[in-house]
């Protein structure tokens, strides 16, 4: 069992726990089965959670979490739903585990969402993405995300990748964007 290199989701939670100073408002951009949302709702005062699949939203509703606002819409429309500044945004890209694999995050909408999210991200805030490149849409999405993220101005954003390099070339990776 690895302590640090085990799993990129745990690593994303570790970064949020330890480096996000103000734990007021978080956004789960891809609710899915709700693992990230559970984590965020324990630490943050308010969590917005997006998913395009009503099955994911309805399932999470059953948890009755007072501090979670569920939004059944694409995260590319984030500006329609959130008008306040946020401290963190988390993305777990790809398809719903155990669900319909044909419904997956897509390059264009993910990119638009990242751009809109960075506009409302507070200085000192983080956007953290788990990117899965084992499937073809994921690979296309990854290429576009990396192109955009590497062009972000370095006086305003730090951008870092965490990727295991001695496994498959198509192993998932974590992309961390920190706003100064
Ligand atoms: C890998 S799963 C998320 C896993 C989740 N964070 C968890 O902890 O279980 C990806 C989710 O993103 C959702 N999704 C796909 N496209 C989306 C979009 N444009 N906006 C919001 N959610 C989307 C899918 O329906 C799926 O539930």
Image: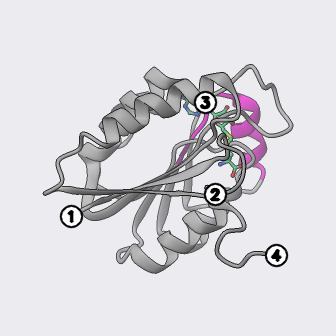
Image position of 55 with respect to 35: above or below: above
What segment is highlighted magenta in the picture?
Answer: 49-62
Residue neighbourhood size for the residue with mark 1, other residues' Cα within 10 Å, grouped as few (<14), some (14–19), many (≥20): few
Ligand 1 resides in the quarter of the picture at top right
Residue neighbourhood size for the residue with mark 4, other residues' Cα within 10 Å, grouped as few (<14), some (14–19), many (≥20): few
The tag on residue 1 is 4
| For marks 4 and 2 on the same chain, the one whose residue lies earlier in the sequence | 4
| For marks 2 and 3 on the same chain, the one whose residue lies earlier in the sequence | 2
**Label 2 vs label 3: CA separation?**
19 Å
Q: Which residue in the protein does label 2 denote? A: 36
- Label 3 element class: helix
Q: In percent of the image, x 70 and y 62: which residue is there?
A: 7
**Label 4 vs label 2: CA separation?**
22 Å
Is residue 116 in the magenta section? no
Residue neighbourhood size for the residue with mark 2, other residues' Cα within 10 Å, grouped as few (<14), some (14–19), many (≥20): many
- Label 1 element class: loop
Question: Depth check: 104 or 52 in front?
Answer: 104
**Label 4 vs label 1: CA separation?**
34 Å
The reply, left or right, for residue 84 in relation to residue 70 is left
Q: Position of residue 9 (x, y in %)?
A: 64, 60
| For marks 4 and 3 on the same chain, the one whose residue lies earlier in the sequence | 4
Q: Position of residue 140 (x, y in %)?
A: 53, 24
Q: Which residue in the protein does label 3 denote? A: 138
């Amino acid at each position: 069992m690895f302590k640090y290199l085990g799993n990129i989701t745990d690593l994303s939670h570790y970064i949020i726990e330890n480096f996000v100073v103000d734990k007021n408002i978080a956004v789960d951009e891809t609710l899915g089965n709700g693992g990230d949302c559970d984590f965020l709702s324990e630490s943050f005062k308010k969590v917005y959670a997006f998913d395009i699949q009503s099955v994911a939203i309805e399932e999470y509703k059953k948890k009755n979490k007072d501090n979670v606002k569920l939004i059944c819409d694409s995260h590319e429309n984030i500006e329609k739903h959130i008008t306040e500044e946020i401290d963190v945004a988390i993305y777990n890209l790809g398809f719903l585990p155990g669900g319909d694999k044909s419904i997956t995050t897509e390059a264009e909408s993910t990119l638009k969402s990242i751009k809109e999210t960075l506009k409302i991200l507070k200085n000192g805030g983080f956007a953290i993405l788990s990117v899965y490149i084992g499937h073809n849409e994921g690979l296309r999405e990854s290429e576009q995300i990396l192109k955009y993220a590497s062009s972000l101005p370095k006086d305003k954003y730090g951008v870092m990748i965490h990727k295991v390099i001695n496994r498959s070339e198509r192993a998932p990776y974590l992309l961390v964007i920190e706003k100064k």
